[in-house]
């Protein structure tokens, strides 16, 4: 706590300096960044500092029953300090401070960390539990660049279509339920959608399957025309949307009361809803999804403890606890055996490669097209944000 | 303040060291002689604080709004550009959102003043001292509860099958109307209190004199009470208007699909990592408030505050 305070004060001091245009004083120099993987581990440093999504590093202080950090501290002697973040963009700024050794990053953050030399290559031989991880999660486009591995998988989950059976006697099988005018009309004002520019990818995914002449091959690689088409689709949807959600409790309540009857969701939200009429489905078009990776900072001061943490959180026991607490699929069959709910892995389709193949994991749209096109410039996240502002109007 | 005035008025009056005797310390003798030194030492701390918190922060905001962001590395590019302001002017959506925000703020202010006037009048002029104390406590109590709790309470009240529907009043559903209702409720104490304070200062004898001279009660209110209340009303209105202008949480929770200026700032600062554009958008409510305050100043309402 004390270190957080001090960090806050340092940040405030930096801000003040920045504001009076003493601009170079606060940034740390690039010279102490180490992006190559280590060959072997040394002695542990006695401490490790972790930056992660809420619910990933629980030491019992939020809920005494939820604690997998204490066991790690006892086992390795590495004391854990952790900080949680709310958005990938916030995490990027925090990671750049160099205060954190290990970072849990979604796909829309990991590549930005690698591109800005904030991530260190991982020597997976030094992470014994890595061998358990499902093969389809290894060496993917969001944790590896040019054949170099920059992270070990944590867990994943899909953005699903949730609906109320009272309004859908037959379960919808397509995202058309939230994108096609004739299907939207009967639920006007009761449609919901995720409140973030990244939701544009959901529209792009639907267009990819329904309008082949737009030639979208990756919902995160949209040129100006394709973005315009997705924006137009979402503007049409906007007329029928009751509310957008980003706070998951808000959506839980909206579906409980019936304020929302159809829209995008996460499995963990469905699990929190007691209304028996509410159900979820993975539409035939597939879905967008998140897939989180543990990464090592290139400015890590405690790399040995950091490796110990990555190995620990990949162990079946810890991974089962962490992913079950958050509500996502674990990363290995061994972890699936350790979950307290025996149905957990079935619910979240862990290890189901065919299921995972229908998922488009979150990436950050950048100017250089992610689908490999070089003849055209793609739209970046700032443009997506602009479009999102216009969609909401 | 009064002592410095006196000292200022007679700066050439020699201090009388003889009276104080040899025990007077050199430091205090120096301060006693040099009024300016004394004043600057006294005021430097609060002035520095004001400068840092208000002036530097505003300047930083203005400077930031003239920068841009490199999209790939998300580093701030510190070359001067007016692109952000051009974006604001060219895109219809920003105009629409700005107008919507001003509209909501104006509606909240009108509703709050309309509700606060009779309540404050009753508290200040009609109620017995005991009832008045209880009413003041009742007005202040909501301020003890968290803002979020109150907005979420409104979310539940206005939801389908919630209290509003159940009591047959009918719910407007989530949207701008819900935002206006929730914000009017949240900022009401800030409007009641200044009006109540202004009313308390209106002497009862004035009202009695007006009555004795044959003015009907409507006329008393119109020609005696209201003119004396203007500063209190203006203070309350400034509170509710500016607080509503900057809000983005209420509209997120009960606003349905609509957005206000605060949301645009939030999404650009928090999600898109585009601080310069966020800073440029933040200039809109600042400009609106400046224009408003200047207009109010022109009417002279600020002088009696």
Image: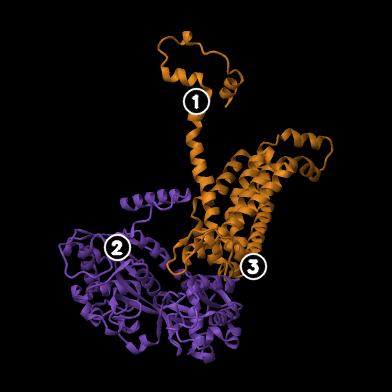
SS label for mark 3: helix
Please report, as a chain letter, where disc 3 is located. Answer: B
Disc assigned to residue B90: 3
The residue nearer to you, when weighing A105 against B215, is A105
Of badges 3 and 2, nearer the viewer stands 2
**Going by the picture, which residue comes out furthest to the top?**
B18
Tell me the tag on residue A211. none
**Same chain for the residues at labels 3 and 2, yes or no?**
no
Tell me which numbered mark, 3 or 1, is placed earlier along the sequence: 1
Name the outermost residue toward the right. B214
Kindly identify which numbered label has been placed on residue A33: 2
- Judged by depth in the image, the label closer to the viewer, 3 or 1, is 3
Q: Position of residue A75 (x, y in %)?
A: 16, 65
> For mark 1, what is the residue?
B38
Q: Residues within 10 Å of mark 1 (few under 14, many from 20)?
A: some
- For the residue labelled by badge 1, is the local secondary structure a helix, a strand or a loop? helix
In space, the residues marked 3 and 2 are separated at their CA atoms by: 42 Å
Q: Which chain is purple?
A: A
């Amino acid at each position: 706590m004390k270190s957080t305070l001090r960090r806050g004060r340092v940040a405030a001091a930096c801000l003040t300096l920045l504001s009076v245009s003493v601009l170079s004083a606060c940034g740390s120099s690039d010279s102490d960044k180490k992006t190559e993987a280590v060959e072997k581990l040394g002695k542990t440093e006695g401490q490790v500092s972790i930056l992660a999504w809420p619910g990933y590093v629980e030491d019992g202080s939020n809920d005494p029953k939820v604690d997998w950090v204490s066991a790690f501290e006892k086992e390795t002697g590495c004391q854990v300090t952790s900080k949680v973040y709310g958005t990938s963009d916030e995490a990027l700024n925090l990671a750049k401070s160099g205060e954190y050794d290990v970072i849990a990053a979604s796909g829309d953050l990991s590549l930005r960390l690698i591109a800005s030399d904030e991530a260190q290559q991982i020597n997976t031989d030094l992470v014994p539990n890595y061998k358990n991880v499902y093969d389809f999660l290894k060496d993917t486009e969001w944790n590896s660049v040019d054949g170099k591995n920059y992270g070990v998988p944590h867990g994943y989950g899909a953005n699903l279509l949730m609906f109320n059976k009272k309004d859908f006697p037959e379960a919808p099988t397509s995202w058309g339920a939230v994108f096609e005018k004739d299907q939207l009309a009967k639920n006007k004002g009761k449609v919901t959608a995720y409140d973030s520019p990244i939701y544009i990818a959901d529209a792009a995914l639907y267009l990819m399957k329904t309008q082949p002449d737009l030639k979208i091959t990756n919902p995160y690689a949209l040129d100006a025309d394709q973005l315009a088409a997705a924006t137009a689709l979402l503007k049409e949807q906007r007329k029928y949307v009751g509310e957008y959600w980003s706070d998951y409790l808000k959506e839980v309540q909206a579906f409980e009361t019936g304020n929302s009857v159809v829209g995008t969701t996460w499995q963990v939200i469905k699990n929190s809803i007691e209304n028996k009429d509410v159900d979820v489905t993975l539409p035939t078009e597939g879905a967008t999804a998140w897939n989180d990776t543990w990464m090592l900072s290139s400015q890590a001061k405690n790399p040995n403890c950091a490796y110990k943490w990555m190995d620990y959180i990949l162990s079946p026991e810890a991974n089962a606890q962490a992913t079950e607490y958050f509500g996502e699929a674990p990363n290995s069959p061994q972890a699936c055996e350790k979950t307290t709910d025996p149905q957990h892995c079935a619910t979240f389709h862990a290890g189901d490669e065919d299921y995972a193949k229908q998922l488009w994991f979150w990436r950050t749209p950048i100017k250089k097209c992610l689908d490999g096109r070089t003849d055209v410039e793609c739209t970046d996240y700032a443009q997506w944000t602009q479009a999102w502002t216009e969609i909401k109007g | 303040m009064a002592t410095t005035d006196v000292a200022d008025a007679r700066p050439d009056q020699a201090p009388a060291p003889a009276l104080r005797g040899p025990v007077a310390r050199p430091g205090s003798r120096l301060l006693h002689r040099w009024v300016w030194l004394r004043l600057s030492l006294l005021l430097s701390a609060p002035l520095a604080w004001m400068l840092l918190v208000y002036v530097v922060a505003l300047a930083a905001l203005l400077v930031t709004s003239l920068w841009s962001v490199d999209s790939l590395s998300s580093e701030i590019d510190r070359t001067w550009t007016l692109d952000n302001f051009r974006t604001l002017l060219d895109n219809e959506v920003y105009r629409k959102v700005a107008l919507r925000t001003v509209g909501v703020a104006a509606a909240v202010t009108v509703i709050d003043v309309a509700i606060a006037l009779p309540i404050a009048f009753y508290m200040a002029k009609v109620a017995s001292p005991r009832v008045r104390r209880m009413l003041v406590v009742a007005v202040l109590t909501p301020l003890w509860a968290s803002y979020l709790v109150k907005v979420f309470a409104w979310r539940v009240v206005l939801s389908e099958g919630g209290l509003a529907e159940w009591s047959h009043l009918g719910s407007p559903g989530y949207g701008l109307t819900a935002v206006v209702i929730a914000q009017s409720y949240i900022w009401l104490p800030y409007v009641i209190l200044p009006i109540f304070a202004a009313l308390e200062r209106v002497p009862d004898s004035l009202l009695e004199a007006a009555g004795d001279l044959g003015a009907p009660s409507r006329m008393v209110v119109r020609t005696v009470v209201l003119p004396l209340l203007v500063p209190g009303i203006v203070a309350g209105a400034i509170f509710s208007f500016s607080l509503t202008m900057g809000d983005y949480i209420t509209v997120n929770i009960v606003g349905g699909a609509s957005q206000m200026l605060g949301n645009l700032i939030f999404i650009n600062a928090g999600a898109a990592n585009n601080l310069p554009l966020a800073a440029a958008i933040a200039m809109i409510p600042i400009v609106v408030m400046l224009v408003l305050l200047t207009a109010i100043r022109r009417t002279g309402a600020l002088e009696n505050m």
